[in-house]
Amino acid sequence: MTTNSPSEKRLEELREQAWKNGVVAGRGVDITGGPIPRKPGYYGQPVVKPPVWTWEVPLYFFFGGVGGMSGVIALGGILFHRVDLALTAMWTAAIAGAVLSPILLIMDLGRPHLFLNMLRVFKHRSAMSMGAWILTAFGMSAVAGLITLELHAHQIFLGTFDQLLRLAAGIFIFGAAIFGTLLATYTGVLIGATAIPAWFLHRTLLPIHFGTAGLGSAAALLELLGHRIAALNFLGFYAAAVETALLIWLSVDKHGEADRAIHEHGSGWLIRIGEVLNGPLALVLRFFGLIPWAAISFLCGALVSRIGWIAVGKVSGSDPESVFAAERY
Amino acid sequence: MIGEGLQSTNQRKHSYVQDRVEVGFFTDPTVCIGCKACEVACKEWNQVPDDGFIWSGNSYDNTGHLGASTWRHVMFLEQDRQKGNQVTGPMGLLTQQSASPASPARTNQQSEDPFRWVFLSDVCKHCEKAGCLEACPTGSIVRTETGTVLVQDDVCNGCGYCVVSCPFGVIDRRPAPLPNAGGAFKCTFCYDRQKSGLTPACAKVCPTESIVFGRLDDLRARAKERVQHLKQNGYADAQLYDPTETSVRGIHAFFLILGEPEAYGLPPKPQVPTIYLKSAWTAAFATAIASIIATLAAFAFFS
């Protein structure tokens, strides 16, 4: 082998680099620690702490969205005399919002047996505290609304008592609708008002995305449960259109290093896949009348993008350069 | 006794809790010798479990960062910068001579490649407006009589929201199988010791008084003087790290640093996340109203 071969040249090059710089970096060779650290920040250590939340939280965001927005659809159902739809919607509201959501939220706690401590205080400055109260109010309205509506729909009681039940069902379902919209949207505030750069830079987008994804998911789920009506189809179009707009917003509103977790890494792919599934793809499928496929696409997209946003938080929170870059905004 | 200079407040009994006096830590890396006595004292007094024995390869620092089981953390920075002249006070060898360019110390310094080693003992900043305290949904995190931020372990249910709300990445949830796992932990400012008139364990053991415990107003004045003094003695990049101009509105455990805060993993402009609430809630309410209108419109026009 001659000394002019590329491999020998490469070795010469490395020797020269070592002589000049006192250090050589290469693939698989980590030079952190010596003699002068060259990683961002303090040895590349995270500046803020990434979230400790596990799979329960994105799933809770998903079911909270479905359950909460089912309450709104149930309100539409009773106001426009579609009691059958309202009943199904109240069942999904109660199961997703009043049973699954609290279970998932409690499972994620480090000390689940102390979950009632959430109701010790009422703090409007803490989105987590507001969320705990919203979930409690929604859960009680949804369960009470479901029971009263079932009793009224099956004419269990007659006369004045039935009229009272009808009135009570109306009030509870109204409550479920109001607290339901907050349950579906507050989760965006929850992660938007944190120290994680990729989250707080998109704090306006997040509640819009989570709320609209919740509404579309609720409509999609009810369609899959057999309620193929024009009103739900319209809501499907509305949600998919808004999600498409949000996908465009997210790809335009870039913040460079500060929110690169959204545009790079596996976390970025989760966000994109989720947004395409519940945005453009759901819209196109619905346009061609493939309603069940559009519904499935939207539900999958809503779930994947929730998982994506939590993954983004973990990547962004572990990235010191993101934190420094975000503070320059 | 060691460290009992004229200004020392570290070894004195006090009644700050009873008198409701705001206290603080002033940590000065220019006198830190990197002995890690503060880390050890903190772990021993507070009975904090070990959080793994990992060989980091980062200088002499195998602690890494603050966390649920690390409430004091001595950083070891290696920088390609001039070290400045050693400032050791009246007994120092170089304080006077080094002013003249002819002194051997000076010439020696200039002929070398610039290099310096900085040690800084990091700790919870006990913010004036604390992200963790604002975020806590159980009321577990409170402000004490001395203005410090304390987690009441028996109340914390481990929701993890304080973890993402701290702009300094200090507080964390302790993972199983460590003792008291599941709860959020951080520096308590030795509230238990303070109630008995004792100084925090880390300040008590610091042999060079790199960590100074005392009244916040005293410490702030003292820190300003120290920066002045250092600047006059060759440490041109000495500055205070106390973000009073951001929404955090100052920290009770503040630092003197050499160079930029980024090198210490300190955010240059930390913000308390509650400032983001207004825009986020506005978007949430707008979405809530839009969803109700869209639903009612859907039923009104399509049924």
Image (tube, rainbow, N blue to C red):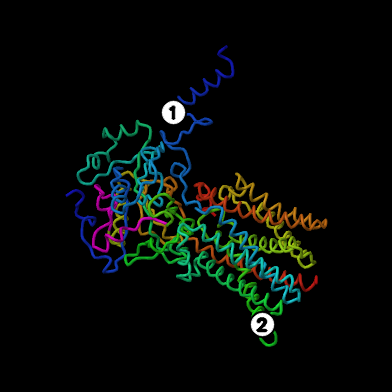
Locate residue A316, reporting x and y percent: 54, 49
Q: Secondary structure at mark 1?
A: loop
Residue A314 placement (x, y as % from top left): 53, 50
In the image, farthest residue toward the right: A288
Q: Which residue is mark 1?
A: A22
Q: Is residue A128 left or right of residue B183?
A: right
**Does B196 appear in magenta?**
yes
| Image quarter (top left, top right, bottom left or bottom right) of the C terminus of chain A | bottom right
Sequence order check: which comes first, mark 1 or mark 2?
1
Q: Which residues are magenta?
A: B184-213
Q: Residues within 10 Å of mark 2 (few under 14, many from 20)?
A: some
**Residue A167 image label:** 2
Residue B26 position (above or below residue A40): below
Quadrant where the N terminus of chain A sits is top right
Chain letter for the residue marked with disc 2 in the picture: A
The residue under label 2 is which amino acid type? Answer: Leu
Please, is residue B215 above or below residue B90 in the view?
A: below
Among the 4 quarters of the image, the one containing residue B8: bottom left
Tell me, yes or no, if residue B290 can be seen here: no
Same chain check for tags 1 and 2 = yes
Query: Would you say B167 lies left or right of A306 here?
Result: left
Is-magenta flag for residue B207? yes
Residue reaching furthest to the front: A156
Chain name for mark 1 = A
| Badge 1 amino acid | Gly
Q: Secondary structure at mark 2?
A: helix
Count every numbered label the image shows and give the total: 2
Q: Residue furthest left?
A: B1
How crowded pointer 1 is (Cα within 10 Å; few <14, some 14-19, many 20+) is rated as few
